[in-house]
Image (spheres, grey):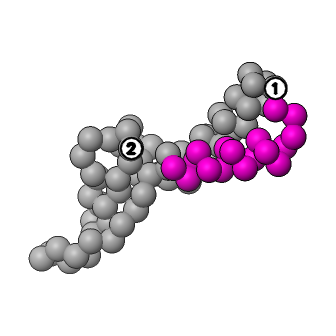
């Protein structure tokens, strides 16, 4: 999970593909605009968030994600 949290572009791409597939084939939504819109809203909600924080040693990047209990701190 930490590997995926450190690469948010990969998570966004994978979640978008999964949701588009689910809405298209499983739920049978044929309109691509509706599929894309609903998928985008869900991906924005579920994607990892990056935030710059200031510490005594300098500025670091903190990644929080709904699926992780603790945030990840990157130098």
Q: Residue at x 76, y 41 (%)?
A: 35
Marks 2 and 1 sit apart, C-alpha to C-alpha, by 28 Å
Residue 30: image x %, image y %? 87, 34
Residue 46 vs residue 1, the one in the foreground: 46
Residue 15: image x %, image y %? 60, 40
Residue 49: image x %, image y %? 42, 57
Q: Residue at x 28, y 52 (%)?
A: 72
Is most of the magenta stretch helix, strand or loop? helix
Q: Which residue is mark 1?
A: 28
Look at the picture and state if 16 lies above or below 64: above
Count residues near mark 1 (Cα–Cα under 10 Å), then give few for <14, some for 14-19, many for 20+: few
Look at the picture and state if 18 lies above or below 38: above
Q: Which dot marks residue 51?
A: none
Q: Which residues are magenta?
A: 29-45
Residue situated furthest left in the rendering: 56
Residue 58 falls in image quadrant? bottom left
Q: State yes or no: residue 40 in magenta.
A: yes
Q: Residue at x 58, y 47 (%)?
A: 43
Residue 21: image x %, image y %? 73, 31
Q: State yes or no: residue 33 in magenta.
A: yes
Q: Residue at x 62, y 50 (%)?
A: 41
Residue 23 falls in image quadrant? top right
Q: Which residue is mark 2?
A: 66
In the picture, the quarter occupied by the C terminus is: bottom left
Foreground tag (2 vs 1): 1
In the picture, the quarter occupied by the N terminus is: top left
Say whether marks 2 and 1 touch (CB < 8 Å): no
């Amino acid at each position: 999970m930490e590997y995926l949290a450190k690469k948010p572009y990969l998570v966004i791409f994978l979640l978008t593909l999964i949701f588009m597939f689910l809405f298209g084939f499983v739920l049978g939504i044929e309109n691509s605009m509706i599929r894309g819109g609903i998928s985008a809203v869900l991906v924005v909600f579920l994607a990892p968030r990056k935030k710059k924080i200031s510490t005594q040693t300098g500025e670091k990047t903190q990644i929080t994600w709904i699926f992780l209990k603790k945030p990840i701190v990157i130098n």
